[in-house]
Image (tube, helix red, strand yellow):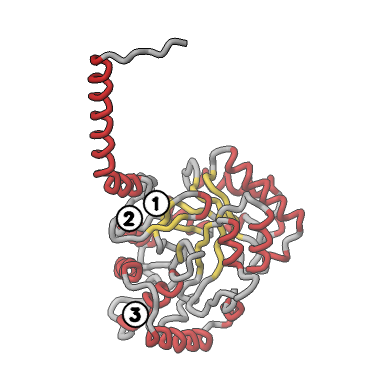
């Protein structure tokens, strides 16, 4: 084949085009850092520059480093629940917190109302435990789906971002067949577009490690993580979380309020000390890279401000802070009420 001869016109044209391309490339490189930052921010729901965000395992969701748990312990008895939850959710949204977890029927109903018209600001984690695996009548896939569908209908929800079924606290009590039933239900909910992602909650760390290693349908888990919790040097649940790329929400970060000296009400004498303790515990929990987000129950706007402050503070504890946390952990062990003595079993996970 004859070689094509380049004319001067071709040379000038091609050179000009190349120059334009080089200039465009240089311009792109000059703004690439900013573009990457903006691209990162646009992928985060309800982004706030004062909040840290962590990847929720292989779901790919970027979740605030501290999120909102469903419980509302120590809420004054005469306070309107939906009004309180709406105000706290609003404060969370203002601060860049973008995940709320509900694990009981009254919680799902309250947060569905609080999030009405602003689902684009927060991810909604759902569990109606009264209709799930803890009760024998709800351990078939068909019954789980029935309960899930009824819950969505009652709360006027088209979908949830995470359906995480609440299992036995000693999850190993579930038989293999029961496990297959909830796996089937989670699959159906996802296939039908009613749950974007799926997971489970349990207090049984050994069973959780087994499930996430054998069932890829489990994308997220919830389990206790307190100021007392340590990572086992070998066969740790956290090692399995990293290996399987599973999202992890830490429940009971304040050990059912045994962390505190006061009553969590405005103006109580221990308020400043309790705020310090809450931040210290959260900083410690967040130092574990397997943790996506602890989910404390927050009952007022001041508590929301305090947990956001904890995210912004230095992550690693110094020697004095470590010693203080150890003293607090001893107090927590001594102060646990009878119904929460099992938290002592979560020191090495």
Residue 151 is left or right of residue 280, and the answer is: right
- Badges 2 and 1: C-beta atoms under 8 Å apart? yes
The label shown at residue 93 is 2
Circle on res. 276: 3
Q: Earlier in the sequence, mark 3 or mark 1?
A: 1
Residue 83 in sight in this render: no
User: Pointer 1: residues within 10 angstroms few (<14), some, or many (20+)?
Assistant: many
Q: Which quadrant would the C terminus be assigned to in this image?
A: bottom right
Q: Are marks 3 and 2 in contact (CB under 8 Å)?
A: no
Q: The residue tagged with tag 2: helix, strand or loop?
A: helix
The residue to which callout 1 is attached is 122
- Distance CA(mark 3)–CA(mark 1): 27 Å
Number of other residues with Cα within 10 Å of mark 3, as a class: few under 14, some 14 to 19, many 20 or more = some
Label 3 vs label 2, nearer the camera: 3
Q: Residue at x 54, y 70 (%)?
A: 224
Measured Cα–Cα span from mark 3 to mark 2? 23 Å
Residue 175 x/y as whole percent = 76, 59
Quadrant of the rendered structure where residue 203 is? bottom right
Count of number-bearing discs: 3
Q: Which element is circle 1 on?
A: loop
Looking at the image, residue 169 sits to the left or right of residue 318; the answer is right
Q: Which residue is more in the foreground, 261 or 268?
A: 261
Mark 2 vs mark 1, CA separation in Å: 7 Å
Q: Are marks 3 and 1 in contact (CB under 8 Å)?
A: no
217 in relation to 343, above or below: above
Whether residue 32 sits left or right of residue 216 in the image: it is: left
């Amino acid at each position: 084949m004859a070689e094509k001869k380049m004319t001067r016109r071709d040379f000038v044209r091609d050179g000009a085009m190349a120059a334009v391309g080089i200039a465009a490339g240089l311009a792109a490189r000059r703004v690439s850092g900013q573009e990457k930052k903006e691209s990162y921010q646009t992928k985060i729901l309800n982004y706030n520059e004062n909040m840290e965000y962590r990847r929720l395992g292989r779901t790919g969701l970027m979740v605030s480093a501290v999120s909102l748990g469903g419980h509302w312990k120590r809420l004054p008895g005469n306070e309107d629940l939906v009004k309180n939850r709406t105000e706290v959710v609003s404060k969370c949204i203002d601060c860049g917190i973008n995940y709320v977890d509900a694990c009981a029927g009254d919680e799902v109903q309250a947060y569905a109302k609080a999030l009405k018209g602003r689902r684009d600001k927060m991810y909604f984690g759902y569990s109606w435990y009264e209709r799930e695996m803890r009760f024998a009548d709800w351990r078939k896939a068909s019954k789980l789906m029935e309960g899930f569908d009824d819950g969505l209908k009652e709360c006027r929800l088209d979908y949830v971002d995470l359906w995480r079924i609440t299992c036995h606290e000693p999850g190993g009590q579930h038989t293999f067949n029961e496990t297959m039933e909830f796996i089937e239900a989670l699959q159906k909910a996802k296939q039908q577009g009613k749950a974007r992602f799926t997971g489970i909650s349990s207090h049984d760390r050994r069973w959780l490690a087994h499930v996430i290693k054998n069932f890829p349908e489990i994308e997220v888990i919830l389990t206790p993580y307190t100021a007392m919790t340590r990572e086992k040097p070998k066969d740790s649940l956290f090692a399995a979380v990293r290996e399987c790329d599973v999202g992890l929400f830490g429940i009971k970060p304040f050990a059912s309020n045994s962390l505190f000296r006061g009553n969590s009400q405005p103006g109580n004498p221990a308020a400043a000390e309790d705020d310090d303790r809450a931040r210290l515990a959260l900083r410690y929990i967040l130092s574990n890279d397997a943790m996506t987000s602890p989910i404390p129950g927050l009952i007022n706007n001041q508590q929301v401000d305090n947990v956001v402050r904890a995210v912004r503070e230095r992550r690693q504890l110094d020697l004095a802070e470590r010693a203080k946390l150890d003293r607090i952990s001893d107090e927590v062990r001594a102060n646990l009420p009878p119904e929460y003595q099992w938290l002592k079993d979560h020191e090495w996970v």
